[in-house]
Image (cartoon, rainbow, N blue to C red):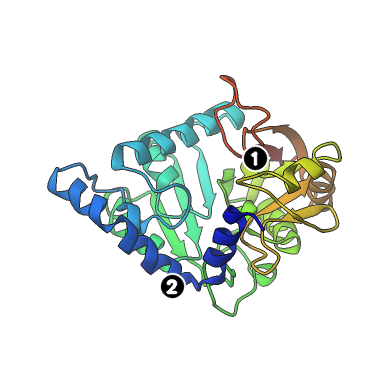
Amino acid sequence: MKKTQLLRNFWYGLSSNQRFQIRRLYYLPVDLKDKLLGKTHKYVPSRGQIYTGSPASASEYIKQGMLHLEHLKTYVDLQPDDSVLDIGSGVGRSAIALSTYLNDNGSYNGFDVVKQGVDWCNNGLGKDFLNFNFKYVPIYNDLYNTSDLKATEFKFPYQDASFSKVFSVSLFTHMQIEEIQHYFHEIQRVLKSGGLCFSTFFFYNETDENYISNLKYFGFPYKKDDYCLMNENVKSGNIAINKTKIKQMLKKANLKFVKIEDGYWKGQNKNNSKKEYQDILVFKKD
């Protein structure tokens, strides 16, 4: 087995608490250095607290969030007065950027399965921006949370037709097929008529299925029906889904497919026109 795969299997074999503690210890020296040099930001967590996405300096973290904002403006026509739902709000990477764009008539709501991330956001952005709200939802996820509530049984804590825009970044890459299908139904419920959704995935089709199974550093070697897994034991570790399958899932949830734009995670599409690592999916509610 490849060395990279062995290391990934070891990492996924740890409990969520063990992964959190190792991350904090690993990044402690550089986090202390940033603090001593005054290179921190009140809304940006330390590298050791960033449990999703790439750990980064405060300036790089804000830059990443601003890219998310630009994506939302480009792909779903985000407006300053939109009512926005962030599914999997993490430690505020996207929310920080949106706080610079949404006006008092707009609103932001986010929820996440990791309490420490929600607490961080509520103690920062949530205090300074009254139209920004973050909720902790104790949903089981074999990568992040050991609670009993299943994602397939979870009802979004919002009224029907509450949001004009919904988005998620690197969320559905860590969920199972039946969970994603349920979330599509919930998105359909909370979206207003004509509302748009932006989300990121790992997609493939029949022509590159074998290719992604053999990628050296980011492969999906475990093939299932219409999807592939990075780790067979930790099903939320990372998932890649067949493009035809995702369109069928949207249709089942009464959502309309708009477009897929490939990212550069496969290494085949990395050029000046590709700004997102993961693949982008845009869909809407009629």
Res 131 seen here? yes
Compared across the picture, whether 230 is left or right of 120 comes to right
Tell me where residue 99 appears, x and y as whole percent: 37, 40
| Above or below, comparing residue 107 to residue 11 in the picture | above
CA–CA distance in space, label 1 to label 2: 37 Å
Q: Residues within 10 Å of mark 2 (few under 14, many from 20)?
A: few
Residue under numbered circle 2: 17
Residue 223: quadrant of the picture: bottom right
Q: Position of residue 227 (x, y in %)?
A: 79, 53
Q: Position of residue 257 (x, y in %)?
A: 77, 38
Q: Residue at x 57, y 29 (%)?
A: 77
Task: For mark 1, give the secondary structure.
Answer: strand
Q: Quadrant of residue 189?
A: bottom right
Number of marks drawn: 2
In the rendered image, is residue 285 in sight? no
Residue type at mark 1 is Gly
Query: What amino acid does circle 2 point to?
Result: Asn
Q: Is residue 96 left or right of residue 81?
A: left
Q: Residue at x 71, y 51 (%)?
A: 220
Q: Secondary structure at mark 2?
A: helix
User: Which residue carries the number 1 mark?
Assistant: 195
> As rendered, which of 187 and 211 lies closer to the eye?
211
* Residue displayed at 20% across by 41% down: 39
Quadrant occupied by the C terminus: top right
Residue shown at the point (29%, 59%) measured from the top left: 123
* Looking at the image, residue 152 lies above or below residue 90: below
* Disc with the residue nearer the chain's start (1 vs 2): 2
